[in-house]
Amino acid sequence: MSAPPVRRRSWAEVRWRQFRNAPRPVVRAVASSLAVAIVLAAGYVLYDLALSRGAALPGGDLRVLAVTVYVVLVLLIGSLVTWLIVPLPSGSSSTRRRTAWSAALGFFAAVPIAYLVMVAAVQIVRPLFD
């Protein structure tokens, strides 16, 4: 008695299943970086709106510096928060350990998140206020 042949899944079905069943550390890393990026991008949009409406802010137009600070803060805070909330698997012991690998996971999750959130803020959210 042979088992029925296994049905081949399409590329889209495989990716959808991977998306639905993502590992918890990856979800936490992306979520922490996303939360930080959204808050900081909202601050950038408010700063950009103030400049475009003629507000006299100290230092003048520092949008390039603001974007640079945004990227650095998203990378640093995203890495730190991920380091705090994503411990390494402990195996059979009950001790939880954190190493640089948790922070590296946060850093590599934060890189595309920082870019995507800033693009969405500048290209989608910002024009809504004009």
Image: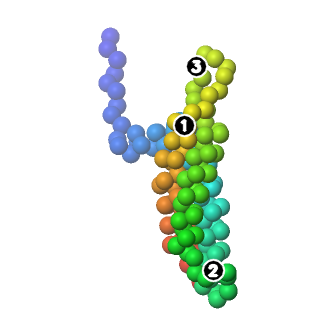
| Picture layout, residue 54 above or below residue 110 | below
Is residue 28 visible in the rendered image? The answer is no
| Point 62% across, 60% down: residue | 38
Q: Which dot marks residue 91?
A: 3
| Point 52% across, 73% down: residue | 64
If you read the primary sequence from the N terminus, does the residue marked by circle 2 or circle 1 appear first?
Answer: 2
| Picture layout, residue 31 above or below residue 40 | above
If you read the primary sequence from the N terminus, does the residue marked by circle 3 or circle 1 appear first?
Answer: 3
Q: Is residue 37 left or right of residue 116?
A: right
Residue type at numbered disc 3: Gly
Which residue does the numbered mark 2 point to in the structure image?
A: 59
| Point 33% across, 34% down: residue | 8
Residue type at numbered disc 2: Gly
Q: Secondary structure at mark 1?
A: helix
Front label number (3 vs 2): 2
Which residue does the numbered mark 1 point to in the structure image?
A: 100
Circle 3 crowding by C-alpha within 10 Å: few under 14, some 14–19, many from 20: few
